[in-house]
Each structure stands twice: as structure tokens, then as C-alpha cells.
Image: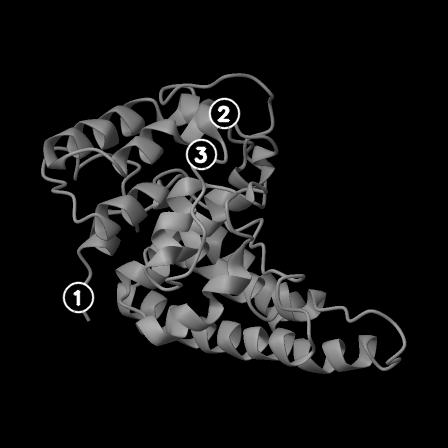
Amino acid sequence: MRDKLKPREWFDDILNLKQQYTHNTDKIAVYKKVNEDPTKPRNFAALTGGYTNDYIEDITYMYSRGDDLSLLEKRALEAIDRYVWVAEEIKKQGYMGKTYFYPGKLVSPHRILSLYTLLSWFICFGINKDKISKIAPFLAPESEDRLLDVVLSRFQQDRKISNISGNPETFTLLDQIIDADENKRITLVELYLKDWGKLLSNLKGLGSLGIHRQKQLTNKTLYKELEVKNATYKGFWAWEVALVVKFFDIDDTTFRDNEYYPDDLVHFKN
């Protein structure tokens, strides 16, 4: 068990509900049904939502529940094939550059944070680089966030890189890691984790984390915001830190025991 705030049964119930009401629906059939009229604009919501983003979202609950990382890896491997299929469908239908996955609820409605999360899973689990390359142009438009562009440029070499952070109030420290030397990068991650609750509270719509009061938080008050009956709670994990540590090969010795840092994911070996 990794999460200390909710019992295992909490995450069992959520995953069972998702299986019953989301995963048991044939999303490809829904996509075809919605697009029977060729004169109307193509609607990819069933594919970019339930078939891909909703499917991989389970990793947040599985991790908090304490599932073996090999099971999470399996889900990520299955998901990347779904993303690749959808990317090819978007391209085939002539919507490349017009339609994106926008995984806006993996951890919060903020799509940059969710994209950091998605990439942390793909990179930490060592997902095939060629497969990530196939979906990189479809994850988000270019030049919205420098860190996101830098990460994706490893898989999409012609990607245009922004010169600013997409949300500087929250992600400035992570953005600074790009240009920092090795020792400075460690310090920046430590500072980010130290104020994680406060920085996170700058984002809007934290309901998907179980936080509903619109006020600035701290690491100490973060847990107090969790509503007992909130079924969207997924655990408090700084997936974005896992991404930068793995991507920039940062030594995590000094912060590996931080309660929000998913260190076992970063050090996973299949």
C-alpha cells in the first residue's frame, strides 16, 4: 500500500466503477457511430478520451493502491498502442495539427501537469521511443510550455520549443532545470518538493486531486483539504518530478524519501 490516506478498498471501488462504466464500452464502436455522417466534422472524443486517456488514468489509482509496478508497466504498454492507433486515425482523417489528446484529467484539469504525468509514465517505464515519437505531435500544440517541448523534442526532433513556462506560478523551478547544471538541478527539485502543496494550489480546478477550496495550500495543509467522500482522489504524487529526474538523469539521493516523490517508479527496471 503506497497511499496512506485511503484504504485499499477505496481504490478498488473506483477501479471497479471505471471498469463497469468506462472500460466495458467499445470506444471504437462509439467513435464510428458518432461519425456516421461524413458531411459533419470528425469527432474524436471517444478515442482521445475513454479509449486512451481514461484507460491510462487507472495508473494513478493502481499506484496509490500499491499494485506491483509490473502491472502499471503493462497498462502503460497497452495504452501506448492505443495512443499510436488513435494518432494514426487522426492523421488518416486529415486532422493532424487540429486534434490533440489533451489528457486533462490524469491528475488535474490542468493539461500541462497531466502531460508531464503521462510522459513520466512512458519514460520511466521505458516505453519504445519510436512509439512515443508517433504520438508526440498529437499530445499538445508546440510552444505552449518549454519543459514539455524540450521533453517531446527527444521524440519529435523538429518540434518548436517555447521560451516560457506554460504556468510559471507553478512550474518555474522545473523550467529552470533545463538550463541548470547538475548540482543546481538537485537544489531546484528540492525547492519544488518543499513547496509542492503551495505551488500546486496555483493551478485551477484541483477537484481531480480531491482538493476543492480555492486558497493557497502548503505541504502541511494539503491533506486537510481532502474531502472524505470525494471519489476523485487519486493520491498525492509529484509525477512531474519523476519526469524531470528521469529525463535529466538527476541524482535523487537527497530527496528520494520525500512523501510525494514516486521514487520506485523512477528506479523501476523491467
Q: Is residue 231 left or right of residue 59?
A: right
The x, y position of residue 73, in whole percent, is 32, 69
For label 2, the residue is: 201
Residue at position x 56%, y 73% in the image: 87
Q: Is residue 151 left or right of residue 109?
A: left
Residue at position x 42%, y 25% in the image: 199
Q: Is residue 39 left or right of residue 1?
A: right
Please identify the quarter of the rendering in which residue 238 is found.
Answer: top left
Disc 3 or disc 1, which is closer to the eye?
3
For label 1, the residue is: 269
User: Which amino acid type is marked by label 3?
Assistant: Ser
Q: Earlier in the sequence, mark 2 or mark 3?
A: 3
Q: Residues within 10 Å of mark 2 (few under 14, many from 20)?
A: many
Q: Quadrant of the C terminus?
A: bottom left
CA distance separating discs 3 and 1? 31 Å
Depth check, front residue: 140 or 244: 140
**Mark identifier at residue 250:** none
Describe the element under mark 3 as helix, strand or loop.
Answer: loop
For the residues labelled 3 and 1, say whether their Cβ atoms are less than 8 Å apart.
no
For label 3, the residue is: 165
User: Which amino acid type is marked by label 1?
Assistant: Lys
Q: Earlier in the sequence, mark 3 or mark 1?
A: 3
Residue 123 in view in this figure: yes
User: Which amino acid type is marked by label 2?
Assistant: Ser
Residue at position x 64%, y 71% in the image: 47
Depth check, front residue: 90 or 229: 90
The x, y position of residue 32, in whole percent, is 76, 82
CA distance separating discs 1 and 2? 33 Å
Disc 2 or disc 3, which is closer to the eye?
3
